[in-house]
Amino acid sequence: MNEQSAEPHKAPEPPEVQPPARPPREPVFNLPPALFFSLCLLAIIYAVQELLLSDDALNWLFFTFGFVPARYVIPLSQQGPELFWTPVTYSLLHGSVQHILFNAFWLMAFGAPVVRRIGTLRFVLFWVFSAVASAALHAVLNWGDVTLLIGASGVISGLMGAACRFAFPAERRPMLPAHLNPRLSIVEALKSRTVVIFMLLWLVGNALIAVGIPLVGDSDQAIAWDAHIGGFVFGFLLFSLFDRAPHPPVMEPDGTEKDVLQS
């Protein structure tokens, strides 16, 4: 005979009701890791140059890593190797708190959808080539000039140009997270009313900068509007070289589309 410890006539207890599970909390800043580390790198470099470097060391930093068009009219035998890396490293330097905060804001706005779409490695390559394109147009229009170019604005303009190819909502299409939109051809982008309005506003802003009317910042500080245009044109025309097929939205078991956060 098997022994049982439970009483034979005791009614079974009802199952304990579990409280409904709380939905996971989403972070306030939902930035891709590559973009987050880019912002941290820019902030660290600026903090070092402002808090730790003397005036002489700061001048050396700007001369060694800033972009100067005059380097490309001087024979190689009369200068150092800085001309090989400064077309990229200038984009990591900033001249004021306002400068870096303004660039960080736009980098978060337009860098996030681009990073989510093309991934970390392609984002790094895009940064490098858009910085070079921005510096190249600046050098052509200021050939032999000894002024110093620093700041990530040219790269950010490249990200804006890239975003025009996919990030804006298309007419008569269902709303998707920005990085999942199909890529528009150059002709399709120029036919999009949203893209054209954005480009016109962007061009007007740079035209004001070109004639000496800054949108923000110190009016006594010159702004390289030509570098902005070089980056934007690069991003708009050549984004397809860095693009990849977007991943489809994640589907829940019941067939509904899972919410996707975008910044």
Image: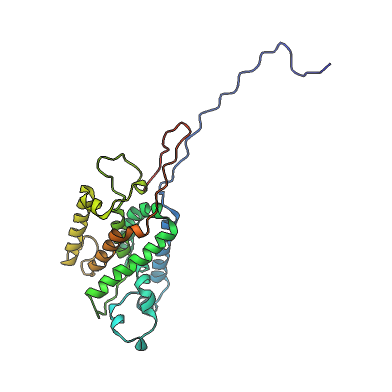
Q: Which residue lies furthest to the right in this view?
A: 1
| Closer-to-camera residue (254/24) | 254
| Rendered view: 75 above or below 262 | below
Q: Can residue 55 be seen at all in this image of the molecule?
A: no
- Expressed as whole percent of the image width and height from the top left, the position of residue 164 reads 28, 53
At x 23%, y 76%, the residue is 142
Q: Residue furthest bottom?
A: 77
| Closer-to-camera residue (104/158) | 158
Looking at the rendered image, the quarter that the N terminus falls into is top right
| Closer-to-camera residue (217/188) | 188
| Rendered view: 153 above or below 33 | below
- Image quadrant of residue 130? bottom left
- Expressed as whole percent of the image width and height from the top left, the position of residue 12 reads 66, 16
- Tally the marks: 0
Q: Residue furthest top?
A: 9
- Image quadrant of residue 55? bottom left
- Expressed as whole percent of the image width and height from the top left, the position of residue 113 reads 36, 51
At x 24%, y 75%, the residue is 140
At x 71%, y 10%, the residue is 9
At x 28%, y 60%, the residue is 237
Query: Quick check: 116 left or right of 185?
Result: right
